[in-house]
Amino acid sequence: MQFHWSNRGWHTFEDFLAALKHKKRKNIRAERAQVVASSLRIEWREGASLDASEWHAVHALYLDTFDAHGNLAALSAEFFVDLGTALPGQVWLALAWRGIRMVAMALFLSSSSTLYGRYWGSRENAPGLHFELCYYQGIEHCLRAGLQRFEPGAQGEHKLARGFLPTLTHSRHIIAHADLRRAVAQYLAQEQLQVRAWRDELLTHSPYAQ
């Protein structure tokens, strides 16, 4: 299960906020105000508009995130440099700058209908910055571009309060070993009931007024 945002006919971020319960709307405005108060410069860029030095800065932030969690970063700087030109109109970034230094980034991929959040990295722990780059900038882009769906990534019940609703997801796998296949199928049948019950419980806490 993941948390996804869907456009319910809104045209602006204010339209989206107006659909939320008062407390959720107030909290989002407060989080965005924190970023404004930090004096960071936030910009939304198409991948093709970044030069090689900017892509290297994006990659360095990507590495920082993986290092912080003790994980291996699989993608090279050259991959990032090539990404923007290889997929014109499909790679987008929310960037935060402190003066001339890039201090945070969120990288997204886009189809004709959906925005997908992929990577995040930051060298500043500014209040609200993660939510601004990873969620609110993406929602604003969807509204401008007419995208109907925003899938910001796996996990995160905290997304619920920011307009992302619990959504069942699926994947397909081939398990050759018959006994293992039966055992996995039995487990998944039980897990499916639990996941659906969890989804239904979370929906009772929807941030939307209706």
Image (cartoon, grey):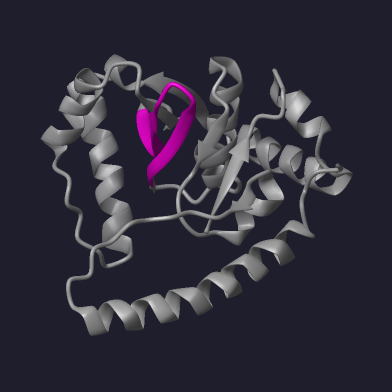
Instruction: Say which quarter of the image contains residue 188.
Output: bottom left
Left or right of 88 on screen, residue 15: right
In the figure, 200 relative to 35: above or below?
below
Instruction: Say which quarter of the image contains residue 184.
Output: bottom left
Pick the front one: 9 or 131:
9
In the figure, 141 relative to 158: above or below?
above
Horizontal and vertical percent for residue 35? Answer: 61, 37
- Quarter of the figure that contains the C terminus: top right
Query: Residue visible at 72% across and 23% down?
Result: 10
Pick the front one: 151 or 53:
151
In the figure, 161 relative to 105: above or below?
below
- Residue 77 highlighted magenta (yes or no): no
Left or right of 173 on screen, residue 163: right
- Range of the magenta residues? 101-120
In the figure, 42 relative to 206: above or below?
above
Query: Residue visible at 28% across and 76% down?
Result: 181
Horizontal and vertical percent for residue 113? Answer: 49, 25
Horizontal and vertical percent for residue 39? Answer: 57, 32
Query: Residue visible at 37% across and 43% down?
Result: 118
> Magenta residues: mostly which secondary structure?
strand
